[in-house]
């Protein structure tokens, strides 16, 4: 979803029945609907099915580094140290869950109270099953034994010494950034200056961001707590909920980062074939608005799905088109909203929520205060990047809890008004957030008019369209036609894997010495690892605490 806003004309692909609407200022050849190859810069020798895409101009992976990253960013190496404090805490929490399960096993009416900190309450042991208490006692004995005599470290490592050294090398290299791709499973390596080039391009957009000298979080938190006091006195929330929703006294600064959009055609990249555009994400965890955004989303989410075009997921979509037949002259089309999150005009978005509230009234919902809290979150979304502070002044950011529901409500109001302007309508029109699919039974020139009408409805919302007479990709499916009569055709589907998708597999043979044993046991271990026998202790025989490769590299990086 590029940030380019242009008018669109219809272009016919030679010798095909596919039509792609592309910006008039772009000369790049459009992709075919059946394309299965990822967009790789011609300057790289990386095979299209390789997991790692190295776009750095100066850094080259050593064989151990390549081997390490080929395991994937979620791969967890064996650790060389143990965290006994974390172990004791985890075992205590596990035992508490077993006690609660036993205590409430005959009471199905118990439901946790939302918007509160996790409870630490435990049932009285006298009211628990004696066999469970005996079981937990054996666990504590096992834990005490292991804490006094720590088990030996693994004799079989799942990485080689050179791969272990590669982790340190990648962590300590300030000149590269390693990120998962925005879509698919690829790992992308960029020079730090390449990453900063794309980040600064976005942050220098004065319509969306503004540099600031100090954080707006203290101001936002003060106003949020004032509104929470009102909600408490009006009986909408309890004292415990008020404490939770108030957020931390020392909120964490939000962090801005990018995920490379390598699925975009490389000739359209920020620097063609060198620096891909990035999807902006703001990590909102433990900020002044993080908890209150959960409360806002709890009220927005149920009404964000109450519109005719709503799609929950792929299964929901397939259930809607199943057994559907269309006239033989029908085309399939998809529409992609260009940078939806950052292009939602805040006053228009809040008005869309207000309108949706009025359509779906709820006496237990504090509409006015919710709207004020929503505006606070949208107008006080500041964040750090490269030791600088920025304030988002337009749109919302991926990372805020309510963002998908808010965007869904905005688009439902947008499409209702925009579609009402169109004299010719599609046979069906479904939307999954910012991805739209429909069936067009009219002429292609009429579709050009249809698209132009939609694009003229709001200055900040631009759609990119693809239309085809036979098949089209949508979500993780390929939708295609099957003739059923001289006048009609059925809609069928098959699984579609995006060009950047790289499947991952579990290697059950880490070393020659363990291959035979693991080959015979790996199937059952996948189930028994989390289902210990009642006759044995629930405690595993060894305890290791292992961060993933991605977490290790990110924790060492100075740039988000």
Image (tube, rainbow, N blue to C red):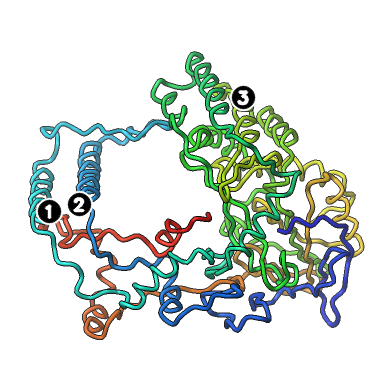
Q: SS for tag 3?
A: helix
Residue 147: numbered disc: 1
Considering every residue shown, the one lying at the far top of the view is 233
Question: Mark 2 Cα within 10 Å, few/some/many (few <14, many 20+)?
Answer: some
Q: Nearer the viewer, residue 242 or 327?
A: 242
> Is residue 481 visible from the viewing direction of this image?
no
Q: Is residue 203 above or below residue 232?
A: below
Q: Is residue 279 above or below residue 194?
A: above
Gap in Å between the C-alphas at discs 2 and 1? 7 Å
- Residue at which label 2 appears: 84
> Is residue 420 visible from the viewing direction of this image?
yes
Residue 367: numbered disc: 3
Are circles 2 and 1 on residues that touch, CB within 8 Å? yes
- For the point 50% across and 63% down, the residue is 174
- For the point 66% across and 64% down, the residue is 474
Q: Nearer the viewer, mark 3 or mark 1?
A: 1
**Residue 406: percent from left, percent from top:** 64, 40
Are circles 3 and 1 on residues that touch, CB within 8 Å? no
**Residue 243: percent from left, percent from top:** 41, 25
Gap in Å between the C-alphas at discs 2 and 3? 48 Å
Q: SS for tag 1?
A: helix
- For the point 70% across and 39% down, the residue is 393
């Amino acid at each position: 979803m590029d940030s380019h806003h242009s008018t669109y004309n219809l272009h016919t692909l030679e010798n095909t029945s596919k039509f792609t609407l592309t910006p008039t200022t772009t000369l790049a050849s459009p992709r075919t609907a059946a394309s299965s190859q990822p967009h790789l810069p011609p300057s790289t020798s990386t095979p299209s099915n390789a997991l790692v895409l190295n776009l750095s101009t100066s850094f080259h992976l050593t064989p151990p580094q390549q081997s390490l990253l080929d395991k994937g960013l979620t791969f967890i190496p064996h650790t060389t140290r143990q965290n006994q404090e974390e172990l004791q805490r985890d075992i205590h929490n596990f035992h508490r869950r077993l006690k609660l399960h036993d205590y409430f096993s005959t009471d199905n009416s118990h439901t946790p109270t939302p918007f509160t900190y996790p409870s630490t309450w435990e049932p009285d042991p006298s009211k628990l099953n004696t066999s469970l208490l005996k079981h937990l006692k054996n666990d504590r004995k096992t834990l005490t034994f292991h804490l006094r005599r720590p088990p030996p470290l693994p004799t079989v490592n799942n990485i080689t010494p050179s791969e272990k050294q590669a982790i340190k090398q990648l962590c300590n290299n300030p000149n590269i950034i390693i990120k998962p791709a925005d879509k698919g499973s690829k790992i992308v390596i960029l020079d730090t200056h390449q990453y900063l080039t794309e980040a600064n391009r976005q942050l220098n957009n004065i319509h969306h961001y503004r540099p600031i000298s100090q954080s707006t979080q203290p101001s936002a938190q003060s106003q949020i707590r004032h509104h929470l006091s009102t909600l408490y006195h009006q009986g909408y929330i309890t004292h415990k909920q008020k404490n939770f929703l108030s957020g931390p006294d020392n909120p964490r600064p939000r962090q801005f980062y990018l995920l490379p959009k390598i699925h975009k055609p490389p000739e359209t990249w920020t620097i063609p074939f060198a620096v891909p555009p990035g999807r902006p994400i703001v990590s909102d965890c433990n900020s002044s608005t993080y908890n209150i955004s959960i409360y806002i989303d709890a009220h927005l989410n149920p009404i964000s799905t109450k519109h005719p075009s709503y799609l929950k997921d792929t299964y929901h979509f397939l259930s809607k088109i199943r057994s559907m037949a269309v006239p033989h002259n029908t085309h399939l089309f998809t529409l992609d909203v260009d940078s939806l999150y950052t292009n939602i005009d805040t006053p228009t978005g809040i008005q869309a929520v207000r309108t949706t509230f009025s359509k779906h009234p709820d006496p237990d919902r504090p509409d006015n205060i919710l709207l004020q809290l929503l505006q606070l979150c949208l107008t006080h979304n500041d964040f750090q990047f490269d030791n600088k502070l920025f304030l988002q002044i337009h749109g919302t950011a991926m990372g805020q809890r309510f963002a998908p529901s808010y965007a869904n409500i905005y688009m439902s109001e947008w499409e209702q008004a925009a579609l009402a302007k169109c004299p010719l309508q599609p046979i069906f029109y479904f939307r999954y957030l910012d991805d739209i699919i429909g069936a067009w039974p009219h002429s292609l020139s009429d579709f050009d008019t249809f698209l132009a009408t939609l694009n003229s409805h709001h200055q900040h919302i631009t759609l990119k369209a693809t239309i085809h007479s036979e098949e089209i990709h949508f979500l993780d499916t390929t939708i295609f036609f099957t003739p059923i009569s001289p006048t009609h055709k059925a809609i069928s589907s098959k699984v579609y894997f995006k060009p950047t998708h790289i499947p991952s597999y579990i290697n059950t043979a880490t070393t020659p010495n363990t291959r035979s044993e693991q080959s015979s046991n790996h199937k059952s271990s996948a189930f028994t690892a989390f289902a210990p026998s009642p006759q044995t202790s629930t405690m595993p025989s060894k305890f290791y605490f292992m961060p993933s490769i991605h977490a290790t590299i990110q924790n060492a990086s100075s740039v988000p």
